[in-house]
Image (cartoon, rainbow, N blue to C red):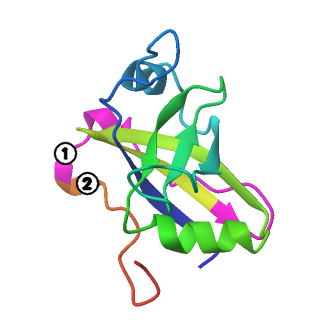
């Protein structure tokens, strides 16, 4: 799959930078379609496969879920071109849209902002046999 929606977890934890920047605040200040960057953290003491997600303003907003990080990390290590954009927030999880192989990701059109939709209205990409660790 060249394009997918991925969950970003840990959005309510403070960052360990000097300012103790607020991840949720940074996400709320982001617009749908704003670029985000993915940064592997092989020296992460909790999970060497962790992939941090940073906003366009270079503030960490969380991590890819542990289920998705191995797949995405493998593609990043292979040097595949990747672009990612902010998609929205639902409760304690943010979502990003990622495209591998070149080109900008397409954000699914929604009639109203994600934060205002019913829980049943938003469905990230379904899991498949190629997902996970």
Please name the residue shown 48% across and 56% down the image: 50
Left or right, residue 129 beside residue 36: left
Q: Do the residues labelled 2 and 1 touch (CB within 8 Å)?
A: yes
Is 115 one of the magenta-colored residues? yes
Left or right, residue 37 beside residue 17: right
**Residue 108 x %, y %:** 51, 55
Which span is picked out in magenta? Answer: 99-119
Above or below residue 41? Residue 131 is: below
**Residue 57 x %, y %:** 65, 23
On the question of residue 112 being in view, the answer is: no
Q: Determine the secondary structure under disc 2.
A: helix
Residue 86 appears in which quarter of the rendering?
Answer: top right
Which image quadrant: the N terminus? bottom right
**Residue 98 x %, y %:** 60, 58
On the question of residue 69 being in view, the answer is: yes
Please name the residue shown 32% across and 29% down the image: 13
Task: Check disc 1 and report the residue beneath it.
Answer: 118
Above or below residue 119? Residue 76 is: below
Q: Which one is in front, 26 or 124?
A: 26
Q: How far apart are marks 2 and 1 (CA)?
A: 5 Å
Is 41 one of the magenta-colored residues? no
Q: Determine the secondary structure under disc 1.
A: loop
Above or below residue 60? Residue 19 is: above
Indicate which disc residue 121 carries. 2
Please name the residue shown 65% across and 27% down the image: 58
Q: Which one is in front, 22 or 17?
A: 17
Q: Residues within 10 Å of mark 2 (few under 14, many from 20)?
A: few
Left or right, residue 71 beside residue 64: right
Which image quadrant: the C terminus? bottom left
Residue 117 appears in which quarter of the rendering?
Answer: top left
């Amino acid at each position: 799959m060249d394009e997918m929606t991925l969950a970003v977890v840990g959005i309510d934890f403070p960052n360990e930078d000097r300012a103790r920047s607020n991840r949720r605040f940074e996400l709320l200040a982001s617009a749908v379609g704003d670029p985000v960057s993915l940064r592997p953290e092989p020296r992460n003491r909790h999970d060497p496969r962790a992939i941090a997600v940073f906003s366009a303003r270079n503030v960490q907003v969380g991590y890819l879920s542990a289920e998705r990080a191995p797949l995405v990390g493998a593609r990043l290590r292979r040097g595949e071109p990747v672009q990612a954009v902010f998609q929205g927030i639902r409760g304690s999880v943010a979502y990003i849209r990622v495209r591998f192989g070149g080109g900008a990701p397409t954000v699914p059109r929604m009639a109203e902002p994600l934060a205002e939709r019913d829980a049943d209205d938003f469905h990230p990409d379904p899991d498949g046999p190629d997902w996970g660790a």
